[in-house]
Structure formats: structure tokens, C-alpha cells
Image: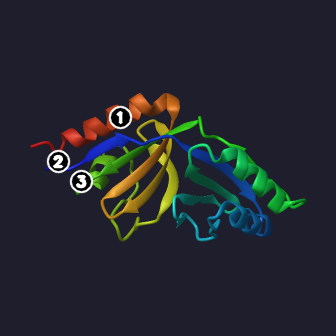
Amino acid sequence: MAEVSFVVLERCTRLAVRAGPEAAEAIGGAVGVTLGDAPCRATVAGDRAALWLGPDEWLLLVPDGDAPTLTDDAARAFGDRAASIVDVSHRSVAIEVRGPRAADTLNAFCALDLDPRAFPIGMCTRTVFGKSEIVLWRTAADTFRIEVARSFVPYALTCLEQGRLEFAG
């Protein structure tokens, strides 16, 4: 069995949300996933996730094609409260990194402490992977999701392969 594997995930809808607490609550209700207020934590409801990226900023990940309906529903929900929702689906690509050496492979190009005590399941953050900015989310004990700019995907995959080679036997 391989120590680590990685795969480019299927397309999804990505919505960048900026909102204050009241608008965030309304938007979460409209889109079906709570926009949590715990720093660097993801909330998940079925096939939807909201990744906390800042005090008033989330990245919503929902099934592909849901953006038009969701943005309309969310806009109606927050009404005249200050908020913005932008469809950024085509900006990034998701890569899943899985296996008992997934954290070690990522650490070849990312300086974050990915020990489960420091970066537990559900934690997410913006960080740097090599020379590219990513959003990193630990989805399971040995599984991470990377959101990387589309133009950096070949670079990120090359870095992952280099990191994986260290553990090839």
C-alpha cells in the first residue's frame, strides 16, 4: 500500500463570502451550512462545507452547479446587511492528499505543524505550499484537501510528488 496518494478532485462550486455575524448567520441558513465563528475551522453539512478563513471571511464549497441558486438565495437572506458573495469556482482546483504519510508529504513544502494535536481534523487555514498560496483543510486523520490556484496545479502536483518520493520504498 502506498504511504501517500494524491488526486485532483472533481469540480465544485466555490463561493467567497465576506459578512458580519448577522449576515453570516442568514447566509448560512440560506445555503444550508453554518458559517462558523471558530477560527480556522470548517463546518460541514452533508455535501457542503464552510471554511473559516478570517473573522468575516469564509470559503463555501458546494456541489458543482449550485452557485446561481445559492448566491440568489443568500443575497435575499442577508438583505440590506453588509455582505458579499462571489462565485470563485474557476479560480481554484482541489487536490486531496491521503495516506499515513500525508502530513509528512505536505511538510516537505509547508512549514505548518500538521501533527493532529496542532492541526486536528476540521482545521483549515491559508498557508504557503512551496511558492504557492493554498487553503489547507484536514478532512480526516490522514486526509487533507488543498485548494490551489488553477495556474499552480502543475507546480503543486510536482511538489507533492517530490514530497512523496522521500517515503517511496
| Mark drawn on residue 157 | 1
| Mark 1 residue type | Leu
The reply to whether the C-beta atoms of the residues labelled 1 and 2 are less than 8 Å apart is: no
Looking at the image, the residue that sits furthest to the right is 80
Q: Residue at image x 68%, y 63%?
A: 55
Q: How far apart are marks 3 and 1 (CA)?
A: 16 Å
Up the image or down, 120 lies above or below 63; here it is: below
Where is the C terminus found, in terms of image quarters?
top left
Up the image or down, 165 lies above or below 84; here it is: above
Q: Residues within 10 Å of mark 1 (few under 14, many from 20)?
A: some
- Which one is closest to the eye, mark 1 or mark 2? 2
| Residue that numbered label 3 is attached to | 101
Q: Earlier in the sequence, mark 2 or mark 3?
A: 2
| Residue that numbered label 2 is attached to | 2
Residue 37, image x and y in percent? 64, 70
Q: Residue at image x 64%, y 40%?
A: 88
